[in-house]
Image: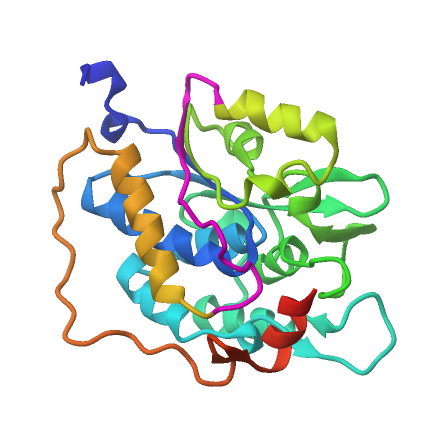
Amino acid sequence: MDAWDDLRTSKKLGLALGGGGVLGAAHVGVLQVLKERGLRPTVIAGTSAGSVIGAAHVIGIDPYDLEERVCRSSWGTFGSFTAKPGLGLMTADALRETVRRVAGEIRIEDMPMRFAAVAADADAHEAVVLDHGPLQEALAASIAVPGVFRPVHIDGRTLIDGGVVQNLPIEAAFGLGADHVIAVRLAPEWDGVGGVDTSLQVHEWVIHPDVTLIRPILEHRSQWLPRDLPGLIALGREAAERALADYPVVNEPPLRDEPIMPPEDEGTPGQPRGIARFLHRH
């Protein structure tokens, strides 16, 4: 590896974490490998699930601690059913409360590194890069899957899940000042939701010489059903280890005494319950 290609020396290393619902657990495995190999992103952009995992990293949650939190999470960690009429079955109030409990009333511009959550303007059908303002509102907007979560209104705009227009936020990461971006692509089939132009733009960014692509192999995994979160994290690790094989391990991972058990309220792999059952059908 040439010295000038060593991303460990980059002062503006970016990380773009794509959307993919439950598949976002794979991002945790990627973060663990980055830590183990001495790669320290200073610019992070995330879409939907990627925004949540990215924000957790920026506010200082260790990736191994984050693994435990993610494996014990459920849909109730992010949303609450609402009987009030509106465009969506759930509000993101549970996510807002989690952010407040963990980080307080934090604003994005006050976070220790550059961060943005990518949402979409429902009317203009364009990406909105939320790099300032209350963190909990930005995350709520970025995960607002149409029909599932209520849209979020920020600065006069009606915002929904950023995956509609920029599911892999490489462009946003460069816009924040990154000079090289490690991009984690979870659900390529979502990249073209915004149309042919959006799909072509993603392709152009993925092959950019200053982009390192990590692509976990997640075939046949549901973006709605959290049936094997530890397995998703492991697949994220495997993909990152393949993509970053040139970098030796400099920080050994901690030893675990026992496996992390998932929550019981979402059902077994064969019998999902509650919100997981509804979303899996759709």
State which quadrant residue 21 falls in: bottom right
- Quarter of the rendering occupied by the N terminus: top left
121 displayed left or right of 71: right
Q: Is residue 83 magenta?
A: no
Q: Residue at x 40, y 65 (%)?
A: 229
Side of 242 where 1 appears, left or right: left
Image: 126 above or below 104: above
Q: Is residue 65 visible to the viewer in this orientation of the structure?
A: yes
**Whole-percent x and y of residue 127?**
70, 38
Is 214 a magenta residue?
A: yes
Up/down of 213 relative to 106, above or below: above
Q: Which quadrant: the C terminus?
A: bottom right
For the magenta stretch, what is the residue range? 207-226
Residue 190 against residue 148 in the figure, above or below: above
Q: What's the colour scheme? A: rainbow
Q: What residue is drawn where x is 75% and y is 73%?
A: 89
| Relative horizontal placement of residue 65, taking residue 215 as reference (left or right) | left
Please provide percent x and percent y for residue 171.
Answer: 57, 29
Task: Specify the principal SS of the magenta part.
Answer: loop
281 or 243, which lies in front? Answer: 281
Measuring from the top left, give residue 136's x and y in whole percent.
Answer: 59, 62
Exactly how many numbered labels are in the figure? 0
Residue occupying the point 42% across, 44% down: 113
Seen from the viewer's position, the closer of residues 217 and 96 is 217
User: x and y percent of residue 253 in the render?
Assistant: 16, 56
Q: Would you say residue 167 is visible in this rendering?
A: no
Q: Quarter-wise, where is residue 273 in the image? A: bottom right
Work out whether residue 185 or residue 127 is closer to the camera in this orientation and state it. 185
